[in-house]
Amino acid sequence: MGISDLIAGFIQEALEDSDGVLELQRSDLAQRFNCVPSQINYVMSTRFSPEQGYIVESRRGGGGYIRITRVRVDRETLLMHVINSLGDTLDLPSARAIARNLVDNGAISLEAGRTLLSAVSDAALRAAPRESRGAIRADVFKQVLIHLV
């Protein structure tokens, strides 16, 4: 298990103990895991992103902190949030993370998640030029979610 997994696990456990809102000092966390603060930033950006159902607020400096909030909302609100937060393009790893979050939160079924990912896969979009796939993927993803609302 790598350092990122250890940090993420610690934060996840602390979030569960704190009912979904946690405030941490970046420097304290880095010291606890004997790593540089940029490692903490990496974990925040890859494991606690909006696509995965978190809001992360950060203030740098001497009194800086990281506040992580686990977003728990009803199904329709979550789907609308995802639809509205999707940009003009969507890469496949982000699509996977968003679909996994929606399934994990019960907003869509596992079967719907698999179908959605199949519809936006590189195999499904192979007839489209590579430079257009992100835009097409975003459009298809949004339209399927709109249908599910």
Image (cartoon, rainbow, N blue to C red):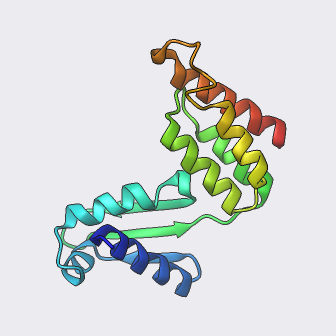
Q: Is residue 98 above or below residue 29?
A: above
Residue 105 relative to residue 52: left or right: right
| Residue visible at 29% across and 76% down in the picture | 25
| Residue visible at 27% across and 69% down in the picture | 64
Rendered image quadrant of residue 146:
top right
Q: Is residue 63 above or below residue 113?
A: below
Residue 118 relative to residue 16: left or right: right
Task: Kindly give the residue lying farthest to the bottom in the view shown.
Answer: 17
Q: Is residue 111 above or below residue 115?
A: below
* Rendered-image quadrant of the N terminus: bottom left
Q: Nearer the viewer, residue 107 or 1?
A: 1
Task: Kindly give the residue lying farthest to the front in the view shown.
Answer: 123
Q: Is residue 11 above or below residue 37?
A: below
Q: Residue 12: horizontal and vertical position, in percent?
A: 48, 76
**Number of disc labels:** 0
| Residue visible at 40% across and 55% down in the picture | 46
* Rendered-image quadrant of the C terminus: top right
Residue 148 relative to residue 123: left or right: right
Q: Residue 143: horizontal and vertical position, in percent?
A: 74, 30
| Residue visible at 34% across and 62% down in the picture | 43
Q: Residue 41: horizontal and vertical position, in percent?
A: 29, 60
Residue 6 relative to residue 27: left or right: right
Q: Residue 19: horizontal and vertical position, in percent?
A: 59, 82
Q: Nearer the viewer, residue 1 or 84?
A: 1
